Each structure stands twice: as structure tokens, then as C-alpha cells.
Image (spheres, rainbow, N blue to C red):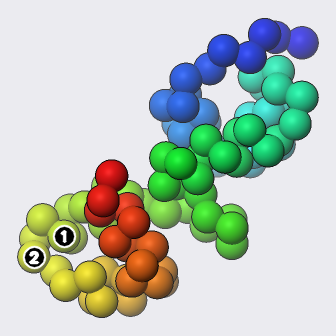
Amino acid sequence: MKIAKASVNEMVNMYLSGMEPEEIRSALGYKTTDYVIQKLRAAKVYDRHRRIIDSGKIRALHKAHWPVSKIAAEEGLSESKVREVLNL
């Protein structure tokens, strides 16, 4: 088993490439999946409903002056989740 010393960016990239948290845990050598999920949530790419949150798209729509309510509807998220992503 590898020594777990991956950056959050590495975990996010692995997740966005299609790997599940359990696969990331195994690949990086962590004992539990909880740490991986915690880091993915902190990076705003994973929520409790196991959805991939496209924070780049949310920021781009916000920059294009879309209202939070419209972004939330487009992404199938709550307005509070959209605001949380934008407050990074």
C-alpha cells in the first residue's frame, strides 16, 4: 500500500476523471474513504447526493451575470450550494 500524500488537486482530478471515492482511497493508500470525501467536499466537487458539481461552469455563468437562481436551476442545485461554490 502506498503512503498517502496526495494533494487535494490530485484527488479532485481523479474524481473528475470518473473515479469513485473508494477507488481514489485505494489508489492513494488511505485506510478509509471518509478523508477523500471530506477533501472532495471541501473542494466543492462532491456533495452528499454524489453529484459532480461543476464549479468552473458555476463561476463562468456568474461572471456572465447569470442570477444565482438561474445558475441553481441550470445545475440542479440549491441556491445556497451555488453561493457556497462562489464564495471560495
Q: Which amino acid does label 1 sit on?
A: His
Task: Classify mark 1: residues with Cα within 10 Å, few (<14), some (14-19) or many (20+).
Answer: some
CA–CA distance in space, label 2 to label 1: 5 Å
Q: Residue at the location (70% across, 47% down)?
A: 37
The residue lying toward the viewer, choosing from 12 and 80, is 80
Q: Residue at the location (78% across, 10% down)?
A: 3
Report the label total. 2
Residue contact between numbered discs 2 and 1, judged by CB atoms under 8 Å: yes
Residue 1 position (above or below residue 32): above
Residue 39 position (above or below residue 28): below
Q: Residue at the location (28% across, 88% down)?
A: 70
Task: Classify mark 2: residues with Cα within 10 Å, few (<14), some (14-19) or many (20+).
Answer: few
Q: Residue 32 at x, y = what percent?
A: 87, 36
Element at label 1: helix
Instruction: Please give left or right for residue 85 compared with residue 63 in the image.
Output: right
Name the residue beneath numbered marker 2: 65
Q: Residue 79 at x, y = what percent?
A: 39, 83
Element at label 2: loop
Residue 57 position (above or below residue 19): below
The picture quadrant where one finds residue 48 is bottom right
Q: Which amino acid does label 2 sit on?
A: His
Q: Is residue 16 visible?
A: no
Residue 1 position (above or below residue 49): above
Residue 62's disc number = 1
